[in-house]
Image: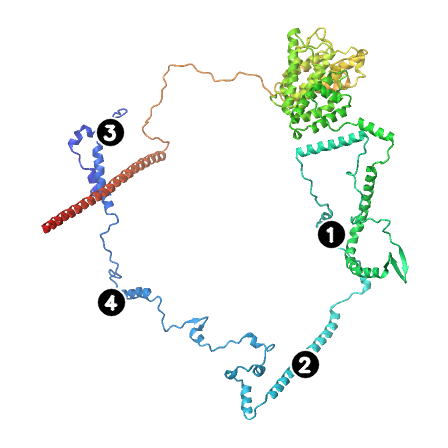
Amino acid sequence: MGKAPKKRSLADKVRKTKTSTEIKNNPFEVKINRKKFDVLGRKSKHDVGLPGVSRSKANNKRKETLLKEYKHKNKSNKFIDRRFGEYDTKMAPEDKILQRFTMERQRVHEKKDVYNLNEEEELTHYGQSLAEMEKFNDLVNSDDESEEKGLLSAELTASHFGGGGLLRKKTAGEQQQDEEGSQRAKSRQELIEELILKSKQEKRERQVQREEAQELTEKLDQEWKSIQALMVKKTPKAEHADKKEEKPKLDEYDMMVRELGFEMKAQPSEKMKTEEELVREEREKLQKLEADRLRRMMGDEVGHTAHCQNHMSADDLNDGFILDKDDKKTLSYQDGKWSIGGESQEDEDEDEDGASGEEEESETEEEEDCQSDLESDQESEDEDKIQEDKEMSLKPKKNLSQEEMKAQQEAAKAELPYTFSAPESFSDLKDLLHGHTPDNQRLIVARTQKCNHPSLGVGNKLKLQKLCGFLLEYIGELATRNPPELTVIDKLIPELYALCQMFPEAACKAMQTVLDDAGHNMEEVLEVKGHAAFPALDMLIYLKVTALLFPTSDFRHPVTTPALLYISHALTKCPVRSLQDVTSGLVLCCLAVEYVSFSKRFLPELINFLAGTLHLAVQDKTSLGYFVVPPFRPSGKYSNLLVVLDSESCKGWSKKTLPLSATQQLDFKDDSDTDNHRLLCLSTCLDLVKRCCLIYEDLTSFLQIFQPIRILLSKHLLAQTLPEPLQELHGEILEAINGAPVAHSRLVFEKKKPIPLKLLTPKIVEVLDYGKKRGSTREEKEKERLKHKYKKEFKGALREIRKDSRFLAREKLNEIMNRDAERKRKVKELFGSLATQEGEWKALKRKKRK
């Protein structure tokens, strides 16, 4: 059997129409597809393409297929027979007709008979017929008519109110009476008597019912009492007395509630005052105290009435009543009655009787408050005693002798004033503070600051800024005195700190000026002499004040950074030629350690100076094993300044602090004092080395930095030659240096892979089938092939859909343009026909006129 021929659609016919030879030979219709390279044995079908021909074929195909579908859209030329049972051969024609008739009647009935009510149906409401309910045969009696109490009888209503007239219905009793009384009619009086008898009879019956109910109640009560004795068992009183009432124990919650009830309640605090208000109050207080001092100095009495208050008891009504001697009245006895100043006792009795009612009413309130009054009596007595003591202390002596007045004036003159004006120059400040104790000098500066606060006046800010500079200059002068007044400096530094916090820029400029002058002086001396002396005590104190007033942990600061540079410059350029220089250098080292304690900034000048100071205590300087850095020398005239001459002085030596006065002048009586000072300098140096070990222990080069000190302490400055306190320091320093972990490794060249030399040997690469999709297995190859085919078909489908949509858009646009052109043509025809008619009508009209 051969294969059945396939049905060819219209699209296949269009596709397989042969192109004419003229088109194939036309060079403008031919497109040549170039190849990158030729492959032997491969046939290609698309070497030459005809884009115009393929485009026309596609358009023809769409016209035959897509365009016809578009034109037949929403159009149908088929009829569907929906008659019931038309094609059912099993049903008889009569059954078909009957079923169709039934369905037709049902359809009509559903539409027309929705609101038609059938007369045979009976409407009901809650199970009752509405037709029966409309007759109203059942009369509903009200609840009030069932009760006899409080209603008037029919006879009473009829006798007094007429009974409703002729239309009133008669009862059965009235009908009988009418039948009997038809023979004899009753008068009005007889009717009233009968009514009275009936009411009395009803009253008697009600009274009898009440008496019977009362008798039954009493009888029931008696029987209940006899039964109650059996039900309730009473315990004798003796047993009650034996049993003590046990009070319930309080829970923790109840105890906490009672404790909270006795706690003091919160009281409102005073309003928070601003800084300006506080300064103003402080100034007013000082001015008031100064005014009192001036009055005492002049001999005037200072009134205490403003400070003390007269004692007032709790019973005082404060009504201003004063009992004078003339107002006293005499007591007399006249006519058997007491009289006071002409008034009889009867009037008093009447007053007392009138007030007795009020007193009786107030007794209950007094009894309620008596407990609180008793509790507050003790407190009021204590307060009275305290107040009386205050009054006695505040009462001024009225009669003072001349000697006492003079003593009071002298005391007021010797007393420190409370208000001061700001000094305008440094000499004014010196005159203001001259002759006062350190505490009084601090008090003067504090009061000057309070009285001239910037918020109290316009020019006070400039005055206090000047005062800050004057205080710095005054501190330097105190340090240059002989002996230096360090106690006064210590007292003035808090006030200087307060001014620095208030005016940081002014304090910064003043301190920068001091540091600049000191630095320039040192540079000038170095240029002239080649070496400079260590800073004096005033400069050392300035450096200490800088550390107190300004932050030392900043990376760069306008005051502390120049101060630290000045310290390092002095430790490097100032030679050590005496014990006084050693003391000054150690003080500078203490300041340097204080500067770098927070920031842990490495200061090599500090370590070099400490190592050089320890080198001064070494006796044998032949083989050192470490380098000595300037300003120290390995050997020479000043290389044995700290060598102890007498070993016996080490036994009785005790550790002390290094005095600042040693930087100015040293006076030794004998060699033992000199050795003690040398040991004191050595102790200070070892303390500083220990602190530096703690500060720089985190540095990676810690061991290398402290290597000279470790060699010096372990080989040259042995612990056996030192006193016991210094031996402990010696051991702690060596433990800290030797116990530091090694945090770095040795330097090694970086390992790199060697770069090979360039060779001219060709690189051979295996050539495979580059154009084919490859996979490891057959399934993967098939999967890759299907994916590639799917992508290709998907892209082709998208391309065809876009072309179809463009084709339909063109056809719709052509239809619209054709309709518009047809409409324009018809409109022109209408206008033309109307114009011809108008012309003919006008021509006919002209003929008629002629």
Amino acid carrying mark 1 in the image: Leu
The image shows residue 407 at horizontal and vertical percentages of 85, 29
Q: Which residue type carries mark 3?
A: Ser
Cβ atoms under marks 3 and 4 closer than 8 Å: no
Callout 4–callout 1 Cβ contact below 8 Å: no
Do we see residue 6 in this rendering? no
Q: Is residue 668 left or right of residue 632?
A: right
**Label 2 is placed on what type of residue?**
Val
Disc 3 secondary structure class: loop
Q: Which mark is residue 208?
A: 2
Of marks 4 and 1, which one's residue comes earlier in the chain? 4
Residue 10: percent from the left, percent from the top?
Answer: 21, 42
Which of the numbered marks, if any, corresponds to residue 250? 1
Q: Earlier in the sequence, mark 3 or mark 1?
A: 3
Give whichever of discs 2 and 4 has the lower sequence position. Answer: 4
In terms of depth relative to the viewer, which is nearer, 779 or 586? 586
